[in-house]
Structure formats: structure tokens, C-alpha cells
Amino acid sequence: MQLTMSRVYVVPIVILCLNQSRFFFSIVAAVLFILASITDYFDGYYARKWKLVSNLGKFMDPVTDKILVSSVLVFLTFLGFIDPYVVILLTVRDTFIGGIRAVASADQIIIDAKPSGKWKAGLQMGAIPALILGKSYHGQYEADFFNDLFLRVGQIGYVVLWISSILSIVSAIEYYNIYKNGVVKK
């Protein structure tokens, strides 16, 4: 459970680092975000390996992911790094999925994480550090090789974030259809 909760514990540190104007703090924020994202994999791996899978863990794992990703995305919007539309779309999707899962649970239908949702999360967790590094470095130095490099990294992160947003719509439809078909089968 501590591995799961570590994603929540790191959020204030990442936000504080992003609030600094020096590129060094952006590197720290990106690295911490990456490390927190990696815990998602290890958390599930060790829970299955050591047979420590629990209902609380199944509930908290996606919640802590959303706290980590949503908090950083909101702050990146505040910094002007991304459009608010992508944050609104992802927040609405996550709220919708949370509602579907809650209703499904009440109807005794279990909806596990689906590949489309996992891909969405993976793309987000890759795009966010790219955005942090790309947007933080850009404009620091004129006619600099790294300026061009980080500009490209930030642009790639931006595109990948939008791809994850489109995939989030696909996964929301998938989750809804799973619930709807599960209710019909009962």
C-alpha cells in the first residue's frame, strides 16, 4: 500500500519544483514524476507476485494514478504549458469512469482495467515529463542546440498527451459498453 500511496506523497514535491523558475527544478519534477509513474507497474507486479491483491488496492491504484496525473496536469495548465481542454477532457473521462465503476460495483459487476485505459495512462505518464522538460527549457537560451532539442521534446509530449486524450474517449466508451453489457447479462 505504501508503494501505491507514494504517488500521492510525491505530488506536492513535484508541484513545488514546477513552481520554481530554474530548469534544474524542472528536471527534478520530471524525474520524480517518472519514478512515481514507475511505481504503478511495480505496485501491481508485486501485489500479484506475492498474492497481496486486495479490494482496497484495486480501488486505490487508479485513484492515486489520477491524483498524480490530474494534479500535475492542472498545474501545467496554470503554467500555460498545455490547453485547459485536454485537462477538462481527461478529468471528465476519469470522473465518468469512476462513476461507471461505482455503479458497476453496486450491481456486482467488476470492471478491471482495460488495455485502452492502460495505454492512455502510459501515454500520459510519458507525455507529462516531456512537456515539463520541453516547456521549462524552451526560451532559456537563444540559438542553443538544447533549446531546439527540448522544444521538440515538448512538442512530442504535447502531441502524445492529445493522443492519450483521444484514447481516453475510446476507453470511456469501452468501459460504458462493458457495464451496459454486464447489466443486460444479469
Image: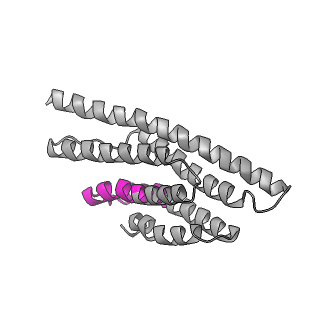
- At horizontal 78% and vertical 55% (from top left) the residue drawn is 147
Question: Magenta part mainly helix, strand or loop?
Answer: helix
Total number of numbered labels? 0
Q: In this view, does 178 lie to the left or right of 186?
A: right
Quadrant where the image shows the N terminus:
bottom left
- At horizontal 20% and vertical 40% (from top left) the residue drawn is 109
- Coordinates of residue 49 in the picture (x, y in percent): 40, 56
Hey, which quadrant is residue 90 in on the image?
top left
Compared to 10, does 181 lie above or below? Answer: above
- Coordinates of residue 37 in the picture (x, y in percent): 51, 58
Closer to the camera, 129 or 50? 129
Q: In the rendered view, how is the structure colored? A: one colour
> Can see residue 114?
yes
> Can see residue 53?
no
- At horizontal 15% and vertical 41% (from top left) the residue drawn is 107
Quadrant where the image shows the C terminus:
top left
- At horizontal 42% and vertical 66% (from top left) the residue drawn is 8
Does the magenta run of residues contain 139? no
- Coordinates of residue 70 in the picture (x, y in percent): 44, 55
Does the magenta run of residues contain 48? yes
Closer to the camera, 186 or 165? 165
Q: In this view, does 76 lie to the left or right of 67?
A: right
Closer to the camera, 9 or 44? 9
Q: Which span is picked out in magenta?
A: 38-66
